[in-house]
Amino acid sequence: MQSYTPNLTHVTEFVMLGFAGVYEARFLFFTLFLIMYLITLVENLAIILVVSLDHRLRRPMYFFLRHLSCLEIGYTSVTVPKMLAGFIGGDGDKNISYAGCLSQLFIFTFLGATECFLLAAMAYDRYVAICMPLRYGALVSWGTCIRLAGACWLAGFLTPMLPIYLMSQLTFCGSNVIDHFFCDASPLLALSCSDVTLKETADFLVSLAVLLTSSAVIAVSYGNIVWTLLHIRSAAERRKAFSTCAAHLTVVSLFYGTLFFMYVRTKVASSINFNKVVSVFYSIVTPMLNPLIYSLRNKEVKEALSRAFSLKFWKGQ
């Protein structure tokens, strides 16, 4: 649990409070979050399956969507199962080791940053497809797609390196109770008895760099897409295209808005309970919405799913 010295207690294990304030309704919240988690898994596994098996979907857009689905599965699985165990398990199910806590934070940050870069790559893909259709094959070749995806994963992996290193240098010698449902940086810094100024500054700058660069690419890409769509003569086609863009921008705005609120700030503390609610949106809600918005509303994906559930399709594999 904790190792003791004459005058100092070094924390070797943390206890995550989770949603302690809803104890009476814990089974309701457990059921709600479990359903959302299972929906996320089913949606994303279905997309990975149909994109991998259906040759009609072997195009750059679906290549990126498959990567996004892999990310969403990992992104939710690194936090939600532990949170669910905290709702219905014993006190021991709320415990997490110091190393396990830093590992969870590293993986969560890695996958979250990778998703930001991947959403930017997907926005660029849509920009080229809509605004420069004649050059699409040359600008977004398979080689380009593989390099873009590889760069997203690499940049995402490098993002938490400095923040996690600085976190590992802090001393935790007081309370070991994390008032959150996963090991996020803000509640961890609140427990440290070291000077966290450097760590706060590094977190702020890294978060700002990741969110600004990726959101700028998305904003410029969709700005050009909207400008192009305004010149479509057919009103029906224009409405359909705007509907798709609006759906994409809504879920991206929700994801980025909550991330900017949580991470692009220099103070570790605001309302703890409000922080938890905001965290639910970017860690649970948007991963559940992304497959619906990006894939399952798509006519080609719907048709591919229909074929995937047909006996004739499986006989042909």
Image (spheres, grey):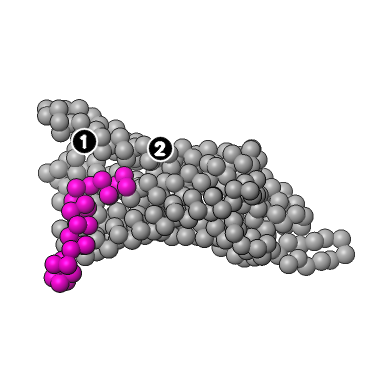
- Type of amino acid under label 2: Ser
The image position of residue 144, as x and y in percent, is: 25, 55
- Give the spatial CA distance, label 2 vs label 1: 18 Å
* Residue 267: percent from left, percent from top: 64, 39
In the figure, is residue 316 to the left or right of 254? left
Q: Quadrant of residue 165?
A: bottom right
Check disc 2 and report the residue beneath it. Answer: 253
Residue at 34% x, 41% y is 217
How crowded is the residue under tag 1: few (<14 C-alpha within 10 Å), some, or many (20+)?
A: some
Where does label 1 land, which residue? Answer: 241
Under circle 2, the secondary element is helix
Is 253 drawn above or below residue 58 in the view shown? above
Lateral position of residue 14 relative to residue 207, left or right: right
Label the magenta part by its dominant secondary structure: helix
Q: Which residues are magenta?
A: 292-317
Q: Is residue 313 magenta?
A: yes
| Residue 102 visible somewhere in the drawing | no
Residue 297 visible in the picture: yes
- Horizontal and vertical percent position of residue 130: 19, 40
Which residue: 13% across, 70% down? 316
Of the residues shown, which amino acid type is indicated by label 1?
Answer: Ala
Q: Secondary structure at mark 1?
A: helix
